[in-house]
Image (cartoon, coloured by chain):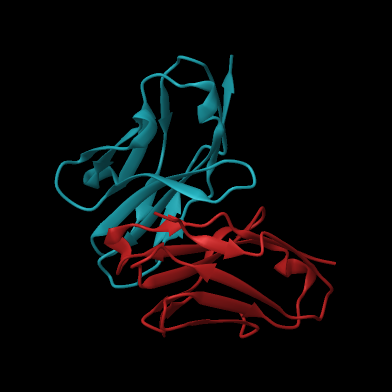
Chain colours: A cyan, B red
Amino acid sequence: AQSVTQPDIHITVSEGASLELRCNYSYGATPYLFWYVQSPGQGLQLLLKYFSGDTLVQGIKGFEAEFKRSQSSFNLRKPSVHWSDAAEYFCAVGGSGGYNKLIFGAGTRLAVHP
Amino acid sequence: KAGVTQTPRYLIKTRGQQVTLSCSPISGHRSVSWYQQTPGQGLQFLFEYFSETQRNKGNFPGRFSGRQFSNSRSEMNVSTLELGDSALYLCASSLLRDRDGYTFGSGTRLTVV
C-alpha cells in the first residue's frame, strides 16, 4: 500500500539556522513527489515537485529537496530559515500508477525562534 | 491568472442536514480533486474528476458525492451530516494528471453542530 511518513511532528529552529524536514514514502510504481506548505487557515501551496531526472530539485522560497530512491526518501531542506517560514509542511506522493490522487504525510509543524 | 476558488469559505450546518461545496479550477485545468483535512486523520483524498467523469474515489461513505460540469467546475455534496464531517475541505486542480502538479484552493471550513 502506498504511504508517506513524516517522522517529525514538530520542529523548532532558530531564525537563520538550516532546516531539514524528513519524508519517507512507500509506492509501488514510479513515484511523483511533492512538498506543500500550509499557513494557518489556508490552503496548500506547492513548494516543489519531482518526477524524474536530476534528483536535487529546487523550489520556491529557497527550498530544495533531494530524491533518494535507495532510501525511499525525499527530504526538504533550506540553508537559512526565515521567521515567515513558520507553517506546516506536507510531503505527498502521486504517481505513474494512474491513481490521479495524492497521498499525504501527517505533516511537520515548523516553529521559528527569533 | 486566477487560482482555485472555493465557495463558501465557512459553513455551519446542523447534524442531519446536507451541504454542497463549490470549486472553480484554474482556467484550462481539467482535473479537479477533493480532500478532507481534519486534525485526527490529516489530509485524505475524497475523489477526482476529469472531463465530468470520476476517475478515482477515496475510502469515504456514500454520503460524500461529487460531480464536475462541462466547464470543469466541481461540486461536492455531503448528505446527512455527522459531527465527524467537520473539517477543512480542499479542492485542487491539475492540467491533466499527477505529474502536472496540483494547485489547491483556500478551502471551505465546514462545522457541523
The image quadrant that residue B41 belongs to is bottom right
Seen in the picture, residue A108 relative to A62 is either above or below; the reply is below
Seen in the picture, residue B72 relative to A36 is either above or below; the reply is below
- Inspect this view and state whether residue B60 appears: no
Residue A33 percent across, percent down from the top left: 32, 51
Left or right of A20? Residue A114 is right
Residue A85 percent across, percent down from the top left: 50, 29
- Residue plotted at (65% across, 83% down): B63
Between B80 and A97, the one nearer to me in the picture: B80
Residue A28 percent across, percent down from the top left: 29, 64
**Count of labels shown?**
0
- Residue plotted at (84% across, 73% down): B14
- Residue plotted at (77% across, 74% down): B82
Left or right of B80? Residue A73 is left
Left or right of A1? Residue B109 is right
Q: Quadrant of the N terminus of chain A?
A: bottom left
